[in-house]
Structure formats: structure tokens, C-alpha cells
Image (cartoon, rainbow, N blue to C red):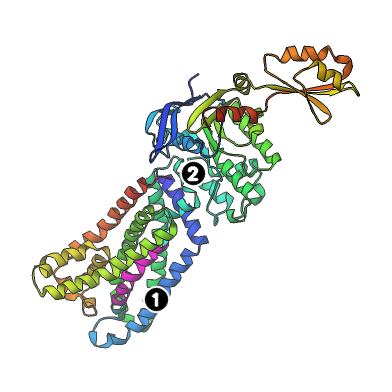
Amino acid sequence: MTSTLTISHLTKAFGGVQALSDVSLNVAPGERVALLGHNGAGKSTLMKIILGLIAVDSGEIAVCGSAPGSAVARAKVAYLPENATFHSALTGLEHITFYLRVRGEPVSEAMPLLDKVGLGHAAQRRIGTYSKGMRQRVGLAQALIGHPSLLVLDEPTSGLDPVSRRDFYELLDGLAAEGAAILLSSHALTEVEARTDRLLILSGGRMVAEGSLHDLRREAALPVSMHITAINGYDTDILAALPNAIRVGDSLHVTCTQDEKLQTLAHVATLKSKVADIDVIPPSLEDIYSYFSRRDGQ
Amino acid sequence: MIARIFATAIYETHIARRNRWVLIAVALMVVFSLVLSAVGSAPSGGLGADRLSITVASLTSLSVYLVPLVALLMSFDAVAGEIERGTLPLLLTYPVARWEIIAGKLVAHTGILAVALVAGFGAAALVALASDPTAIAGAGALWRLAWTSTLLGATFLGIGYALSSQSRRASGAAGLAIGLWLGLVVLYDLALLAAVVADDGGTFTTQVFPAALLANPADAFRLFNLTASQATVAASGIGSAAASIALWQSLLSILVWPIVALGLATLAFRKVEP
């Protein structure tokens, strides 16, 4: 299947400062891709380039087969800016009605859209009276207008409470199932972990890692940690049997590489009569993220 | 295309209504028009003109100052305000061309200005008609003043959008707008007057001066209205200048300026990087 978004060897500098260097990526229809990176890593710049708001210095980019920012591309792309802002004097309903008109969609869609993001009750109130989370949901409602082929969402869940976040990802799942490609940036790593198909990590304007969480975990080859709880009095025996174990509080911690994991577990299993419990803790997404962001001199 | 311009125009009308710009513009025009028609009626006795024509002469002078000012006040925020609020990037990702956004704003703001002008001039006309039944003879001059004022407003709205695109802050754009108003409406005429006096009937007065008047939309507006209604020439100070410039020339300036201003605004807005 052809990609909805194709970027190859993209480079952008702002007055001598390299914002993006040789960035390449693809997003296929129905795919949910998370873009991770520090503040200033180039996430927002990349998104603005995809939207056609900023021109590139060099590199190729195709959005739904067209140039970014072209009329064809804009008709198929929806955007949710970081900290979505709207004119405070107008109501949520007036805003959504405006956005529907500009996209050539029926105005009667406005209330169903606002209901969908849980703002039906506040539709007639001015945006100036909305909380940050409510404004974010107006942003979400406008991004759902029509049937966008590509959704570009800049930190879409910032300002949303945990329940709203879950609802939001359910909306995204529905859109992806209908064939929309989704590119979202986030700082909430644990959140995107379960809710996206692929992760991209930007660091200092470079794409330092790309793949599913499973791929990245394997590539990073970070050590696995095991927390062993000994049956009363046997902890010294276990420490003696496992030379690299250390005592942390009431439990014993063992760290090993991915390759040694099964071997270590087998070793612990031989001490079965002395072990009360064992927890195997894989490297967290935060660990993997830090590993890739730091690898290139960050 | 029309639908998107229309959508933007409705959106901007809502904002202007909420921000009380509609109310402010109407109130300003009505109050000033009534005051001027009351004051302007005093010297009319010996001129042999009807009451409404005299009022139109006063309203022409009022419009030259007030219409550009109100237009600039309504437009200075148009682009810089969107940048400052952070609403521009999202808008520009929508399938709407930049000129369509500008045109939509222009339609809304010109409409509001037209409503204010009709209210103000209408009030002045009613006062004139109530005291002088022959005043109906000045209806043509009033109608001419109304549509030329609307075009003058559209010109300054366009210039306001262009200035607004040059600034990333609304406060900066406001400064530019006030500066422009002072320059084009107040200082421009003073400078021309000083030059004419210094020149004392030389080539500047015969060649450059008429062109300079036509180049300024506010002066062209004043010239056209004064030339068109001969009765008001008596009540004005630049009658002699008006006489040397053909009516079609000032009319052309009035008609071309709104298009030029819209073009300037679109060019300036195209350069804005959100």
C-alpha cells in the first residue's frame, strides 16, 4: 500500500541552527505513529513542514501524493496544534461551524462533533470561559471534521484528564481503523506505548530510532532487572549463588543482558525452595527513550 | 471559493459583534454626523444651497478623518492578532487560500462600516429633511458620499491588513496603523500645503500637486465629492485645487484604491510565516 506521508532526507535550518538533518520517514494508511523527542528536538518543526507552514531547505516530502501545503494536501490533512487556541469571544459551536464551512462540510455536523468530544453542554459558551482541557477538545473536534487521510497531532493529550485521554485514543483507533494515517507527538511515553503502532525518536533534529517498541527494545539491548524476594533467612544463600545480585531493601536485585535473561531465570529456578517471588522488569519506555536520545551526543 | 470567503466573513462578523466594534462604529458615526449637521447648518443661510447639500459638505470632511480611522482600528488586529493568539497556524492548514481569508475579513469589516455610515448619514439626513423640505435636492450628493465613503473604508481596511501582516504583535500593528493615519490623512495635506505655498505657482503646483492629491485615497475621496457636487465647493477650502483635476481622475483613484489595497494586503499576508 502506498504511504500517506513520505519524507526523505529532509533538512531545515533556522539562521544557521540545524533544526532537522536528513530526516526520513513513512506513515502508511491506518498506521498510528508516535513522534518522541525532547523540547527543541524538532518535532513541531517537522509537523509544520508536513503541514506546509514552513518551507524545507532540502529533501523530498509528499503528503497524500501532493506537495505539503498544496490545496489537495490541505483538503486531506487535519491538524491539532500544541495548546490549541481559539478566539475567546466566540463559542465552541461558532468555531466548529466556521471550520465545517471552510472544509465544505454540512454545518449540521457541528453539534454531533462537539458531543463526540464531550463538549455538547458547553457548545453555546464562549471559548474564553473554557478550561485548557475543553479548548484542547475543541481542537480535537475540528481535527475530526470530514474524513482526513492524515492527522497531525502535536501533543494532543496535554491538558486532558486520564479518562479524556482514554476516550481520545479510542477516537484515534476508530479513525485509524477507517484508514487514516496518524502522526502524533507526545511526552507521555507510557501512553503512546500501548496506543501506537510505531515510534520515532527525534534528537537534536535527527531521527535516532524508528520501529515498534519491541524492535527498539531489542535494538537498545538494555539490561533486564529481576527483583527476587527470598523466603525468610535464605537471602544470604541466594546472594552466594548469584554473584551479581545486590541487596536493595528487603529484596535482591539481579541485572542481566537480554541474552542472559533465560539463563539467569533458569539459575534462579534451581533455587526454587529458597525463593518466595520473582519479578522480571523489562527496560521501560523511558529507559529506551533516554538511551536513543543520548546515544547521539545529547 | 465563495463559500470559504462567506464562512470567514460570518466568523469575522461574529467577532466584531462580540467585541462591540459594530456598536462603536455605529455610535461614532451617528454622534459625529448629528453634531456636524447641527453645527454645519449655521452658515447655510447666504449660500443658496439646500440644507442637506451643506450637511454633505460637512460630512465629507468628517468622513475623510473618521472613516480611515475606524477602518484602521477594525483591521490592525486582523493578522497580527491571529499570530499573537496563536490561531493562525491552524487556520492556514485549512483548505482556504490566503487571499480568501483577507477577502472574507474585508467583506465583514466593509459591511460593518457600511452599516455605520448608513446609520450616521441617515441620521444627519433626517435632521436636514425635518428642518428644510427642499433638502431632498441633496439626496444625490448624500448617496455619492455614502458609497465613496464605503470604498474609502475598504481601502483603509486593506491597508490595515497589510500593516497587520508586517507585525507579529497587535500592539505593534496598532502603532503602525495610527502612524499611517496621521501620515496619510493629516500630515500629507499639511506637507502638500506647505510645498504649494513655498512653490508659489511653479511646476510643483501645476504638475506634482494634482498627482499627489490623486495618489492619496483620502484626498481623492475629498476631491471627488467636492468636484461632483458644485454646491459644496463654496463651503470648502480646496475648491481651486479641485477645479484643475477632472472628475473621472478622482473617481478612478477611488475605484482603483480598494483593489490595490486588497492586493497589498494579500501580498503582505502571503509573506507571513506562522
Is B21 left or right of A216, judged from the image as shown?
left
Is B199 left or right of A167, judged from the image as shown?
left
Q: Which residue is mark 1?
A: B32
On screen, residue B215 above or below B9: below
Q: Which residue is mark 2?
A: B90
Q: Nearer the viewer, mark 1 or mark 2?
A: 2
Q: Main secondary structure of the magenta part?
A: helix
Residue B148 position, x and y percent, is 30, 64
Please state the total of marks drawn on the protein image.
2
Dot 1: few (<14), some (14–19), or many (≥20) neighbours within 10 Å?
some
Q: Chain of mark 1?
A: B
Residue B98 position, x and y percent, is 38, 45
Instruction: Report the amino acid beneath label 2.
Output: Leu
Q: Residue furthest left?
A: B202
Identify which residue is drawn at 15% across, 73% down.
B196
Identify which residue is drawn at 62% across, 52% down.
A130
Range shown magenta = B56-73
Inspect this view and state whether residue A107 appears.
yes
Q: Is residue B70 one of those drawn in magenta?
A: yes
Residue A281, picture quadrant: top right
Identify which residue is drawn at 58% across, 49% down.
A93
Q: Is residue A296 one of those drawn in magenta?
A: no
Give the CA distance from mark 1 to mark 2. Answer: 40 Å
Q: Earlier in the sequence, mark 1 or mark 2?
A: 1
On screen, residue A95 above or below A116: below
- Asked if labels 2 and 1 touch by Cβ distance under 8 angstroms, the answer is no
* Residue B61 numbered mark, or none: none
Residue A158 position, x and y percent, is 62, 42
